[in-house]
Image (cartoon, rainbow, N blue to C red):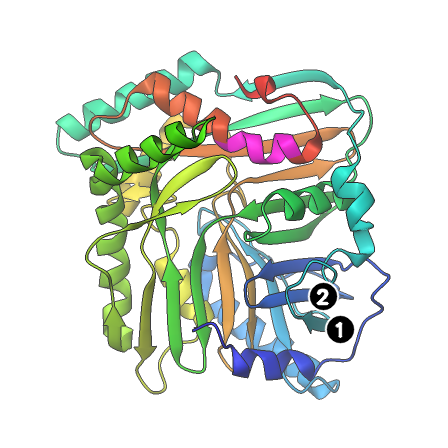
Amino acid sequence: MENSAPAQAAMENSAPAQAASPPDFLFTSGQGTISAYDLGQPITTPACEWPLLERQIARALAAAEAAGQANPLLVGAFAFDPAEASCLYVPGRYERGVRMASEPMTFAAKAALASAPASNQVISVQSTPAAAEFKASVSSALDAFAQGRLSKVVLSRKLSLTLHKPADPEQVLARLMSQNPHAFHFSLPLGQDRRLLGASPELLLRVSGGEVFTHPLAGSAKRGNEPEQDKRVARDLLASRKDQHEHRLVIDEIRRVLTPHCRELAIPANPTLMSTDTLWHLGTPIAGQLNPGQASVLSLACQLHPTPALCGYPTELARQFIREQEPFRRALFSGIVGWCDSQGNGEWAVVIRCGVLDGHQVELFAGAGIVAGSDPAMEWAETGTKLGTMLNALGLDLEVAQ
């Protein structure tokens, strides 16, 4: 699965862009780096209007091909709620590079930007919801579980910051790449100088030459400060019945969606441990072979999204619970971001460990999966830990999230 030859060939057919110029859109993974330029106007049709959206994408790709691109790309993001606007582009130019320290960060002066101490200050901070409201929502979810209405729901919060100096997207991206080198990094323009940035640990879906791969994460624990403590945290997570149950809900739903499209699908019986700089996660790598002539990566991604890892289970009931409980719109947070080509190959990651930068204003997001046995105070603390990825990249005190 790691040799993505069809996708690699597709990327090399594009006209090269100037390496010194920051790309309008950036997506990095273990497969390589995609830099897109000249994005033009976005396609904003929501995913729930799939027939219309599919036609619009096909027309845009055909127009790019007619303009000389051998295998044009679609890049961008889908919202968490399929009824909300997408943010998709067919770029006029793109290039792909091998994932290595020097390639994706040349435009960001990587060494200086990643290591230089930040000198910004927080003028104001607001959590939506506040701690008491978030914990009350967790308690409401526990009641719903006891009544048999839900098995899992993912509750989140938004941290709104006003900074003394405007946040520098290039510096933040360089720091994200430095502190989380194996993450899926992304940078997407949202219009009017707003930009979505993040370092997601989770792949939703990759398709290359008929091979399909996904690596869902569900169940997590804050890493220990000392090596022995960290090992103990990892062992406890792997043995946790609550976290194993949360993870199994995600795997079962992915199996349900992918099985009809695959002639082979290998799903390990048990999850394994996967780490970021701040958290341990339970993860299950799933690989398969698509049926001949089956759906593209984009179609499959939209069928999978949102998985119970981002929304809950059952999906529609969990989504309705989120609408009732969360006092803000997620928009692209906990959506999916990535790319696909005109041959059906592509890669999409979930939009987590992320924020929206807009000059002095910054919005950060984090969520926690709630299942029977969840503790409201611990789930609140988990969101604070997850916010640490972006707070670190911004050079801000982690206590801001508490």
Write down the quadrant of residue 106 in the picture. bottom right
Q: Position of residue 280 (x, y in %)?
A: 40, 39
The residue identified by callout 2 is: 36
Amino acid at pointer 2? Ala
Above or below 18: residue 395: above
Q: Earlier in the sequence, mark 2 or mark 1?
A: 2
What segment carries the magenta color?
Answer: 386-392
Above or below, 396 relative to 353: above
The three-letter amino acid code for the residue at tag 1 is Arg
**Residue ID at (34%, 60%):** 285
Residue at figure coordinates x 83%, y 66% from the top left: 19
Left or right, 169 with respect to 179, comes to: right
Q: 257 left or right of 396?
A: left
Q: Position of residue 241 (x, y in %)?
A: 18, 36
Q: Residue 99 magenta-drawn?
A: no
Dot 2: few (<14), some (14–19), or many (≥20) neighbours within 10 Å?
A: many
Compared with 119, 317 (above or below) is below
Asked whether 74 or 105 is in front, the reply is 105
Query: Can you tell which mark lies on residue 93?
Result: 1
Is there a contact, CB below 8 Å, between mark 2 and mark 1?
yes
Quarter containing the N terminus: bottom left
